Amino acid sequence: MGAEQDGPVVTSDREVTTAGPVTIRPGDPRYLELTSAANGRFRCRPRQVRVVGSTAQVVQAVQDAVRGGMRVAARSGGHCLEDFVDAPDTGLLIDLSELHAVGYDPGRRAFFAEPGALLGDVYRTLLKGWGVTIPAGLEAGVGIGGHVPGGGYGPLTRRHGSVVDHLEAVEVVVVDGSGTARAVVASRDAADPARDLWWAHTGGGGGTFGIVTRYWFRTPGAVGADPAALLPAPPAAVLDSLVFWSWPDFTPESFGRLLRNHGRWHERNSGPDSRFTSLFSVLTVLRRESGMIGLTTQVDAGRTDAPELLDAYLTALNEGVGVPYTHDVQTRPWLSTMLRPRMSGNVWGLRAKCKAAYLRRRYTGAQADVIYRWLTSEDYRNPTAGVILAAYGGRAAAVPPDATATAQRDSVLKAFYLNNWTDATQDDTHVTWIREFYRELYADTGGVPTPGGDSDGSYINYPDTDLADPRWNTSGIPWSTLYHKGNYPRLQQVKARWDPLDVFRHGLSVRLPD
């Protein structure tokens, strides 16, 4: 079978056409590319892929899926770590990559981005056009479509909050109880009858209520018609710091000291009014055979005390550690640091299994020992397995946990446990390693980071279906609480109203209430 071009879309009087709608089936040379995703462990084999170029085309594609009895899934950037899109039962895959416009909407006094826009494109357009930005993720190649509804965060979150704290409205294709697909615009306006649908997209996760075809952003309280005053301005430049410690020189004691120092600093300096909200860092601790432990840090170079803040941070982390390290700091334009980071996390096409946790406090001494042992053991080797600790808190903590669907507001770090490899025959070995590492790390709380203690559950944008598996979650706390805490019942009510037929579903989608 080949491709079916359903007709060109004329976008202006110059007879310019855009892609979509295009239907691609197995046998078409493009099928393999359009069914590829970031995690090489998964690949769906849908009956058709629909490349779309407008909201109306998304509505039609969803309607076709419902009428044809096909499970529908949507892909924007393709970075989902589980098989939410690339599941065996996906029948119609909607490719949103051609919906990638970014601009300003004067009618809403808000900036818009379509779901296929990559974060790097959003940053570039907003900065060059209006001198503003949104506090979203560090990886420029991630599509905004899935990043936002999970409650995305990034280097400016400590200073300006989560990206959803600036979400003004969403346009969503939903399916009602009669099986009819339609597009709905939902905003944060208290008088909007669809406000609950907006709220669900501020941390409830993607692929569970409908398909977003447009996001609008404006900072709460921003007034006037000047676009440059409606979103935060990024720093003109940042101090871009890169530290490497020599992994082989660490002992269990010095390693524990580094983790303890790092965690303690974030406990003390992650409040909404901390003088360190302009500082963001990522500590990357892969297995010892990687050779180095790395720390990247950004500080707003426009602050007169920026060098002092950076020095105080690095001094606190190295206090009593005694392990050699190198330090290189450059002053770089902010956009350059976002588009071309000096340490990249791009693992597209590798096979992966990942897990996560929100941390409210530093690791305990026992947990630091577990991490050291699992990252230095001689019975397993993989230099791309380990843990990444990203700074959180700051202004993100100023928002009440029920104001958005992102409930974990007083955490100070996000922990991302990762394992990447290439050989499919080694899947069981590598998946088992990270499962058992994570289970032992959280052995005192049933193998998972339960909310309310040192940890505070997990982050839905780093999904892990093991949390819904009683073999790996023995805490007695359901996966829905680990991800959404007390917001989950409200999310279920939104689900019942806007997706009563459960058209949009995956392994960790919000379930219909009983």
Image: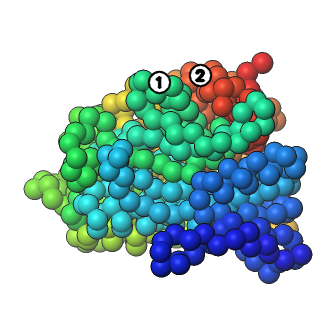
Q: Which label was assigned to residue 490?
A: 2
Three-letter residue code for mark 1 = Asp
Q: Is residue 40 visible?
A: no
Task: Point out the tag, 1 or 2, that comes first from the N-terminus.
Answer: 1
The residue lying toward the viewer, choosing from 75 and 226, is 226
Contact check, label 1 and label 2, Cβ < 8 Å:
yes
Residue furthest front in the image: 13
Three-letter residue code for mark 2 = Arg
* Image x and y of residue 226, in percent: 21, 50
For the rendered model, the colour scheme is rainbow
Which residue is the site of mark 1? Answer: 402
| Label 1 Cα crowd, 10 Å radius (few <14 / some 14-19 / many 20+) | some
Q: Residue at x 47, y 74 (%)?
A: 13
Which image quadrant: the C terminus? top right
Q: Is residue 321 left or right of residue 146?
A: left
Q: Is residue 144 above or below residue 264?
A: below
As measured in the structure, the alpha-carbon distance from the residue carrying label 1 to the one carrying label 2 is 10 Å
Q: Is residue 237 visible?
A: yes
Q: Residue at x 73, y 54 (%)?
A: 61
Q: Quadrant of residue 504?
A: top right
Instruction: For mark 1, give the secondary structure.
Output: loop
* Image x and y of residue 189, in percent: 40, 29
Q: Is residue 458 above or below residue 337?
A: above
Instruction: For mark 2, give the secondary structure.
Output: helix
